[in-house]
Image: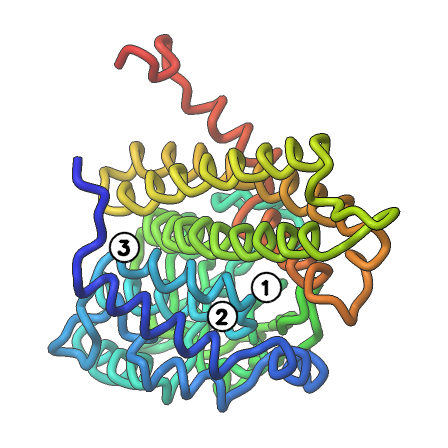
Amino acid sequence: MDFDFSDDQQQLRDAVAKWVEKGYDFERRRRIEAEGGFSREAWDELSELGLGGLFIPEDEGGLGMGAVEGMVVMEELGRGIVLEPLVQSLIAGAVLAGHADEDTKDNWLPRIAGGQAIVVLAHQERKARYRLDVCAAVAKKSGDGWTVTGTKSLVPVGDQADAFLVPAQADGRIAMFLVERAASGVAARGYGTQDGSRAAEVVFDNASATLLAQEGLPVLEHAVDIGIAATCAEAVGVMEKMLAVTVEYLNTRKQFGVLIGTFQALRHRVADMKMQLELARSMSYYANLKLNAPAAERRQAMARAKYQLGQSMRFISQQAVQLHGGIGVTDEYIASHYFRKLTQLEMTFGDSLHHLGEVSSRMQDTAGVFA
């Protein structure tokens, strides 16, 4: 199997890496975090690169690219611990392109691709504990349309978004809806999150909604799987940069006049970090290459990948902080921000314990070893 990236994929990586290096340095990120965790200006710059339209067909204004391109982009954004939630545009583009009617596609897809509209997934509820089949929000028929009532938690940039993808119970099953933030009955309360980004509690009170799919659970599962694959790729970028920062510190910090990077015990710990990084990278590749697989195979792959990424994130972030010592947890130093990012990514779209249960529940008699 050829794991080399194509020239187009490499050019895409280089373009994003250049923007992160020159346009999204640590000081700018800190300003954005202090101002609320989201910058419309930075979002527009991402859109100018065409990144919001990665998964949107070309005839709808997007780039019409696939999972590998999404992985390449998210790795580079991870290296810059970019706060703006591009993964949400990837999810929205794929869901709307695959399930919305033509009028809805024509109305939203070109604007998502161009950055004029932000559409985010609003699916988490307080009692669900990462389970996608647990949904208390309710949708009811209202004339020719629908209304949605319920509360969704930790909605990325929920108080800044233009619309939400919302799962809700309709006629005894979970359906998927599009709800505009400007619709009557929608209220969003924004707040900062662990990694410095922005989220919101969003309340829907008989809010007007557009039905996307009557059988919404498979659509929701696919949306979350896109998010898991993108999160895995982003985490690889974060871990790679955190390892580089740690190695640089070990090669400059002296103890008793000797560089601590020469201490064999610390070199062994760095080697262990590198092994965890490469294991995480291989599972990120696995997850993204399985995005278009049949649903059961895809779901199993995402659970496996997210569990391993969770283990790697925890190991690398903890080792990095310990190797830095006290400076590793100070807000002024970049390592602490990578630590916070990895802590949040580990819990995004299901934490390690949840996905360990998912892996276990999907094991067959062979556990996949000889199948």
Residue 155, relative to residue 132: is it above or below?
below
Q: Which mark is residue 67?
A: 3
Q: Earlier in the sequence, mark 2 or mark 1?
A: 2
Q: Assess disc 1: are there few (<14), some (14-19) or many (≥20) residues with their C-alpha within 10 Å of its C-alpha.
A: many
Q: Amino acid at mark 3?
A: Ala
Query: Which residue does the image show at 72% across and 82% down from the upper left?
Result: 34
Q: Earlier in the sequence, mark 3 or mark 2?
A: 3
- Provide the residue designation for mark 2: 85
Q: Is residue 39 left or right of residue 108?
A: right
**Nearer-the-camera pick, 220 or 237:** 237
The residue tagged with tag 1: helix, strand or loop? Answer: strand
Please state the horizontal and vertical placement of residue 125, each as a whole percent of the image: 61, 55
Q: Amino acid at mark 1?
A: Lys
Q: Is residue 147 left or right of residue 351?
A: left
Query: Which residue does the image show at 42% across and 42% down from the upper left?
Result: 281
The residue tagged with tag 3: helix, strand or loop? Answer: helix
> Which circle, 2 or 1, is nearer the viewer?
2
Q: Is residue 267 left or right of residue 75?
A: right
- Provide the residue designation for mark 1: 152
Could you give the CA–CA distance between mark 2 and mark 1, rounded to whole angstroms? 17 Å
Query: Which residue does the image show at 22% across and 58% down from the upper left?
Result: 66
Please state the horizontal and vertical placement of residue 65, each as a whole percent of the image: 20, 64
